[in-house]
Amino acid sequence: MIQKLQRRYLPENFEVNTWEDIGPYFDALQKAPIASKHDLENWLNQLSELEAVISEDACWRQIRMTCDTANTELQQRFEYFCTHIQPQVQVYADELNKKLMASPFVKELDTATYFTMLRNIEKNITLFRAENVAIQSELSVLQQQYGAIAGQMTVEVDGQIFTLQQAAKFLENPNREKREEVYKKIYERRLQNAPELNDLYTQLIQKRHQVAINAGYSHYTPYKFVEMGRFDYTPADCAKFHEGVKQHVLPLVNHIYAEKKKELQLDVLKPWDLEAIPADKKPLKPFTNTDDLLGKTKTCLQNLDPFFADCLQTMQQMGRFDLESRTGKAPGGYNCPLAETGAPFIFMNAAGTMDDVVTMVHEGGHAVHSFLAHPLALTAFKEYPTEMAEVASMAMELFSMQHWDVFFTNKTELLQAKLHQLERVITIFPWIAIIDKFQHWVYAHPSHSVEERMATWQQIRAEFASSELDTTGLENLLAHSWQRQLHLFEVPFYYIEYGIAQLGAIAMWRQFQQNGERALQHYKQALALGGTKTLPELYTAAGIEFSFEPGYVAELMQFVWVETEKLQREAATS
């Protein structure tokens, strides 16, 4: 199904332990003569192999650390890489980039194949500053402190200790007093670390700002847009997206919340009511444990496309899952591509909810992307745009709904799950806009105080708040609610991708509803291109439009709303 890359440059038993182990291979590449196009292609293959081995080693260090944040040895191994290996790699990478671009034989490389890779290399040369190497090393270590802090957060409910992910299950409880109690416990627990996380974020902002200044930028935003390879949209386009959400998504969110209030027979809808299950319904229990979750997900994807299930089966055989929530484990979920062996690793915090199913198929979409891109010749070809990566995952969420009967044999529960998913597709947009707009403000004002940060967060949050949701009396709790978003700490500016990709996923689902076989073919052929095409070209290969103009947002929201109303009518008559 998938094969580890064959080593031709490094010994088969080579392992990354110290820079002294790796350095000679970089040095040899730096000194290697390139006298022809053939020499250049061979040199690129050797560099790609070295990059894959180092990348996979770094990923395993991070994976193991996030699986057990309390293990100091694992943390030290990760920090050693960040402080003793990564800085040296960065310096050599810049020198090798310059050597490549200076070669006259670059012009003989196939433009269609190498365009995006060479564009990224030129961008990296432009951004590189020797004085930033140490700062970026410090950032790599600092960013991981968030997971260590959040991984230790627990609350006590009914005499039992739960992680915050596990405790969130109580927010589905029909008993409103219990929901309020647990909601406040979760946020009050977060508040205990609020000063520490504020201080951490301030340090991250200051260091990121300095990196941008060193590279010749006025502040971090334009620097980061270049670093992330956002060649096809600008901060001004992000502002258009924010407006599109306000104009065309918020009215739907208000309608959803109004219906929720009516369904729960409430006069006022509070934040702890949003996931509540009415007394005449039972909370959805799509799986019993993580083995059951994985087994049912494989069956679901098998029914959709056998290749998708084969990917998960291969990963299971290779031990590439850590799914359950537990104390000492970092929060969140991710799919981590592993460049040499090919099969990625899926990490999540399953607690027995419907959201876990969505997370599982979401990360499964990322995993399929990793499998499809792995056969590409160079490691650089597999570095696909994050916006396309999220289309892979979010489209899989929507495609998989067709086979959610694997999780729900009862039709009423199945319809309830599908409606929950479509409502989530709509209601996530305001949060995406809030997080993105907040980041733009944060980095445009790098010297702001904690008080200014809290006030601005509240202002932006209010701008996208639903008129149907009452947060009176919760101002202090919600002033720090941004701290639950790990992306702010660990992967700055990585969040609007979810909004752009959600639009792409909706467009793919619309295509799927019209012709499922054709949509899956487009999906797979686009993902198999990895990063060898531009973002608009990848969207075209998937048969969809790359746009997040307000008018396009309105068009896709209308489609989702029509599909939601169909399910509502079906649920009313079932």
Image (cartoon, rainbow, N blue to C red):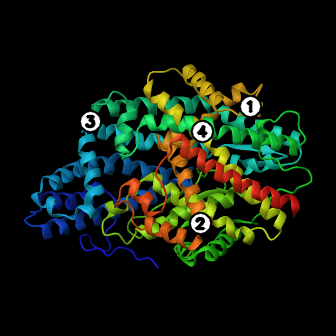
- Which labelled disc corresponds to residue 512? 2
Secondary element at image label 1: loop
Q: Which residue is mark 3?
A: 131
Give the CA separation, mark 2 to mark 4: 24 Å
Q: Does the CB distance between marks 3 and 1 fall below 8 Å?
A: no
Q: Which residue is mark 1?
A: 467
Q: Which residue is mark 4?
A: 245
Residue type indicated by callout 3? Glu
Give the CA separation, mark 3 to mark 2: 49 Å
Sequence-wise, which precedes: disc 3 or disc 1?
3
Q: Residues within 10 Å of mark 3 (few under 14, many from 20)?
A: few
From the image, which quarter does the C terminus lie in? Answer: bottom right
Mark 3 or 1: in front is 1
Secondary element at image label 3: loop
Q: Could you tell me residue 303's position as x and y percent?
A: 64, 76
Q: Does the CB distance between marks 3 and 2 fall below 8 Å?
A: no
